[in-house]
Amino acid sequence: MAKATRRERRPQFARVIFYNADMGMISPVVSNDWQRPVAELIRDCEEMWSTNFPDAMCARFIGWYCAQPRAGGCLTVDNLPVPVWQPSADGAAPPAGWLDRLLAEVSGWDPPAVLVQLDALKITQGGRVLWQSEWGELAERMAREGCEGPAAAEFEARLRRRAAAFKAADTRKRRAAARKAATTRKAREAERGAAAGS
């Protein structure tokens, strides 16, 4: 009997919650026996980070996941106990600290929920950072240091470098298009000259 050389990965149960601390918004809980590490799936999602609204991001992730080839499994989506308030009615605001209390509670679940913080571009579980984009880390530093701190200067420098890189790429494309047009024009002129000389 042949021995299996590759260990088969067992599905792992996890709950995923998308939230935006700046906006005070949170999505329903998406639960499943995931075939791959859920943080890896979230990073692979083509729709990831395409919106700051947790409920929309949750729906996009579910749609993307359901379109992937996979064996079995059934997603469940459950609402969280979120306070109800009418933000437009006479200046009413949500109860203070409700999001922090809810996030602390779900971090204590067994297993802890996987939290996807859209405003910080970060994925955590049980207080441990599983992944964070470098832009998200920089944004968190800017929030702590303010707009005049070193993080803001770094952010500005990165934006300048990025803009310069885009401009250089655009210039290269335009020059390549101009060279191609000139070559095509010369080839046509040569064909016309050869046709006229015959």
Image: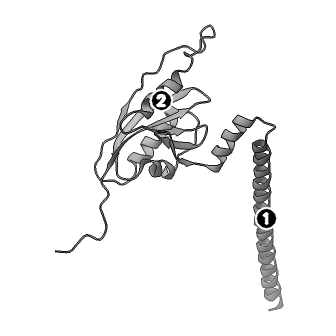
Per the image, label 1 sits on a secondary structure element best described as: helix
The residues bearing labels 2 and 1 have C-alpha atoms spaced at a distance of 53 Å
Q: Which mark is on residue 106?
A: none
Asked if 129 appears above or below 145 in the picture, the reply is below
Asked if 185 appears above or below 125 in the picture, the reply is below
Mark positioned earlier in the residue sequence (2 or 1): 2
**Could you classify mark 2 by the number of other residues whose Cα lies within 10 Å: few (under 14), some (14-19), or many (20 or more)?**
some
Mark 2 lies on residue: 104
Q: In the image, is 143 to the left or to the right of 57?
A: right
Quadrant position of residue 74: top left
Residue drawn at point x = 52 percent, y = 21 percent: 98
Look at label 2 and name its amino acid. Ala
Quadrant of the image for the C terminus?
bottom right
Quadrant of the image for the N terminus?
bottom left
- The reply to whether dot 2 and dot 1 touch (C-beta < 8 Å) is no
Q: Position of residue 168 (x, y in %)?
A: 79, 62
Q: Position of residue 108 (x, y in %)?
A: 41, 33
Q: In the image, is 129 to the left or to the right of 79?
A: right
Residue drawn at point x = 31 percent, y = 50 percent: 11
**In the displayed image of the protein, which residue is found farthest to the top?**
90
Q: Position of residue 141 (x, y in %)?
A: 69, 40
Mark 1 lies on residue: 174
Look at label 1 and name its amino acid. Arg
Quadrant position of residue 49: top right
Residue toward you, 194 or 42 = 42
